[in-house]
Image (cartoon, grey):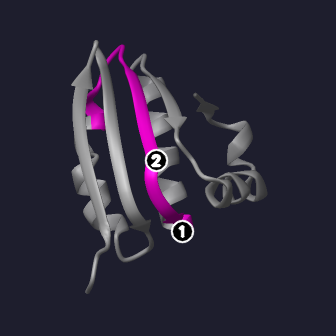
Amino acid sequence: MNVDIKTTIQEENGKVIAFLEGRFDTVASSVVEKALAPLFECKDKEIILDCSGLTYIASAGLRLFLSVLKSAQGNGSKVFIRGINDHLRTVFAMTGFINIFKFI
């Protein structure tokens, strides 16, 4: 099982930023889910999913992003996505996720 993704979480100016780099495919989803677990505990925060280094996202990745969003809404937090490339933007548009998330 080769996982080609790196996930880093840091806090900047009261915002929680998750940096994702590499390929977010189905194999990587369980690894990323564990790495993003702290986001499910954020209360009244801005959460930024930084996709600047993300080259690919599978449906499992989209589902995890949606789980983060639903959890955040229940905790009074807001989720923003930044840094998506044209390929990722096309995936978000085709799936309708472009209308669900806020992009910065």
Q: Is residue 54 above or below residue 72?
A: below
Q: Residue 6 vs residue 104: left or right? A: left
Q: Which residue is mark 1?
A: 58
Q: Residue 58: where, in percent of width, then height? A: 54, 68
Q: Residues within 10 Å of mark 2 (few under 14, many from 20)?
A: some
- List x then y, in percent, for residue 98: 71, 43
**Residue at coordinates 27% horizontally, 59% vertically from top-left?**
6
User: What number is the disc on residue 88?
Assistant: none
Relative side of 61 to 11, left or right: right
The amino acid type, in three-letter code, at marker 1 is Ala
Q: Nearer the viewer, residue 52 or 45?
A: 52
> Is tag 2's residue or tag 1's residue first in the polypeptide sequence?
2
Element carrying mark 1: loop
- Is residue 48 highlighted in magenta? yes
Quick check: 22 above or below 38?
below
Density class for disc 1 (Cα within 10 Å; few <14, some 14-19, many ≥20) is some
* Image quadrant where residue 68 sits: top left
Do callouts 2 and 1 mark residues in contact (Cβ within 8 Å)? no
Residue at the spot of label 2: 52
